[in-house]
Amino acid sequence: MREQSFITLFMDDDPQPIGEFPAPVSFDLDTRKLTDGSHILKVVSKDHLGKEGIKFIPFVVRNGPAIAIEGLKKDEIVDGVLPLMINAYGKGDQKSFMLVGSETPQSIPWWLMVGIILFVAWTGYFIITSLSIKL
């Protein structure tokens, strides 16, 4: 009989384990082999008496290029023609930074435009009232 606990790792609903290791274990999970999206790492531990413990660890893989969309939000109700701006950019190879396409252009927020208009109007009012005092 084994006197040591063993840890078995499963990915998603796959009945074939990705590895079985004696405890404690240091394990490098290569997410480049997984598809982008939600996954669940299932960790099953078994002690020397045969008792099992199970832990599920959900995580999200995003190895592919990031996608940014402006003009449409999740679960938004829309009609007519929608002007969309879509950008996709990758991280590079972890050793060099890709400058081209790494930023998503965005339109100016409406509240910023309102703030600028109010500031210009206040400035004009202040100048006009200051000039009228000197006359």
Image (spheres, rainbow, N blue to C red):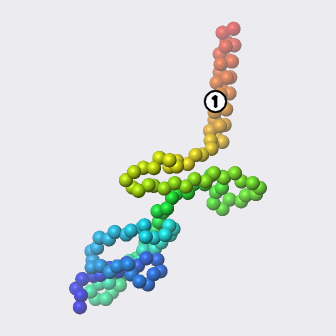
Residue 121 lies, in percent from the top left, at: 68, 27
Corner quadrant of residue 88: bottom right
Q: Which residue lies furthest to the bottom in this view?
A: 1
Tell whether 121 sits left or right of 7.
right
Residue 39 lies, in percent from the top left, at: 47, 72
Q: Classify 92 as above or below 116.
A: below
Residue at image coords 45%, 50%: 98
Tell whether 102 sits left or right of 16.
right
**Viewer-proximal residue, 92 or 117?**
92
Identify the element where label 1 is drawn.
helix
Residue at image coords 32%, 80%: 20
For label 1, the residue is 119
Residue at image coords 44%, 55%: 92
Residue type of the residue flagged with mark 1? Phe
**Viewer-proximal residue, 76 or 100?**
100
Whether residue 1 is visible, yes or no, is yes
Whether residue 58 is visible, yes or no, is no
Viewport quadrant of the C terminus: top right
Residue at image coords 39%, 55%: 94
